[in-house]
Image (cartoon, rainbow, N blue to C red):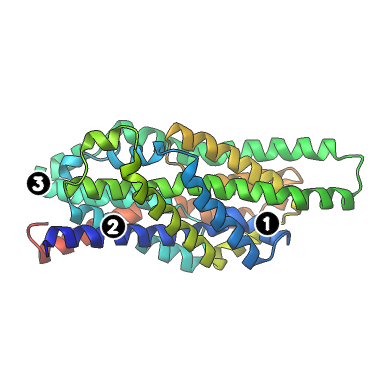
Amino acid sequence: MNPNFVLLVITVLTALIFDFFNGFHDAANSIATVVSTRVLSPKVAVFWAAFFNFAAAFALGTAVAKTISGAMVDLSIVTQYVVLSGLVGAIFWDIITWYWGLPTSSSHALIGGWAGAALARGALVRGWHHAFTVIKPAGWTKTLAFIVISPIVGFAIGFTLMLAILWMARRRTPGQVDKLFRSLQLLSAAGVSFAHGGNDAQKTMGIVAGALFTAGYISQHEMATTWGYYHWPIILAAHAAIALGTYFGGWRIVHTMGSKITKLKPVGGFAAETASAITLFGTALAGIPVSTTHTITGSIVGVGATHRLSAVRWGVAQRIVWAWIFTIPAAAIIAACTWWVIHALTPGA
């Protein structure tokens, strides 16, 4: 059997394993609030989220996938081993932060790993002084900016929406408000799951497309133009993997997101999820690979802040922010080290 084809299969399977871990790690994004408010049981909530993660395959296009596959790294430096090393870096960081119970971004772990492995090979091929020429600054500008912008937008929309709801519901009893928003939270949780599938699964689709390009199965033109029926196996496989990961869930992070940052009631859960979904739909359609985790965390903090600033556990929020800061460089370092190990064992890498 052709060794290059075997390597491609291993790389694609590793990408789908990452996608599974993405769903597993980021299950908290879409179900933490609906579980913590006890609108749905954990088992029903993960099934609900997994269904809408998969359904997004048919609606939100591939703009984010195109950004990941060709707009962030010079594809002339990319080999199968670069893609594989990047995925290992992302998976390893996801496992570490899952163990710590920190809701970090699988998306940023992925692009960090992708860049770190490319930089490692760039340093070898072009020299250490020219290693950063493998990075396309234009593709990173929006992504890095939205590390800050997406939680702020989530905070602002969550805060504003919660205040508007409180004003509109001021003449209703707490029982009436609770009953109404327990039903509405089913829709908002579905919206976050749908947006999560549409945004995060596309990142793995972009990495798989990069692997197929380096193996010679698709052209750079095909990756840059609208994906056709030829790409449907990639799209469906990525969404299926993230849906399965979501179904099996990561309860350590659900606990952090749903109860440690601030206490939520159904009305607050609805506001946080709706704010997050609005932000994620907009960025997915614009092709900006933002973090679902950052967005929903900002929304939850915004909702908590409408009561009083002390309602937000800022110590927990601070730990989360530090984990966000370290995600891209940490995944990049792990991926770069992985590539150098592979290169030492396989000089042609």
Check residue 12 in the rendering and tell me which mark sits there, or answer none.
2
Return the disc, 1 or 2, that comes first in the chain's sequence.
2
* Residue 79 in view, yes or no: yes
Q: Residue at x 35, y 63 (%)?
A: 92
- Contact? badges 1 and 2 (CB < 8 Å): no
Check residue 34 in the rendering and tell me which mark sits there, or answer none.
1
Which picture quadrant has residue 10?
Answer: bottom left
Query: Tag 2: residue type?
Result: Val
**Residue 309: % across, % down:** 71, 46
Return the disc, 3 or 2, that comes first in the chain's sequence.
2
Q: Spot the residue most to the left.
A: 347
Query: Tag 1: residue type?
Result: Val
**Residue 310: % across, % down:** 72, 51
Left or right placement of residue 287 versus residue 210 in this view: right
Q: Residues within 10 Å of mark 3 (few under 14, many from 20)?
A: few
* Spatial CA span between label 3 and label 2: 25 Å
**Residue 104: % across, % down:** 47, 55
| Mark 3 lies on residue | 125
- Contact? badges 3 and 2 (CB < 8 Å): no
Secondary structure under tag 2 reads: helix
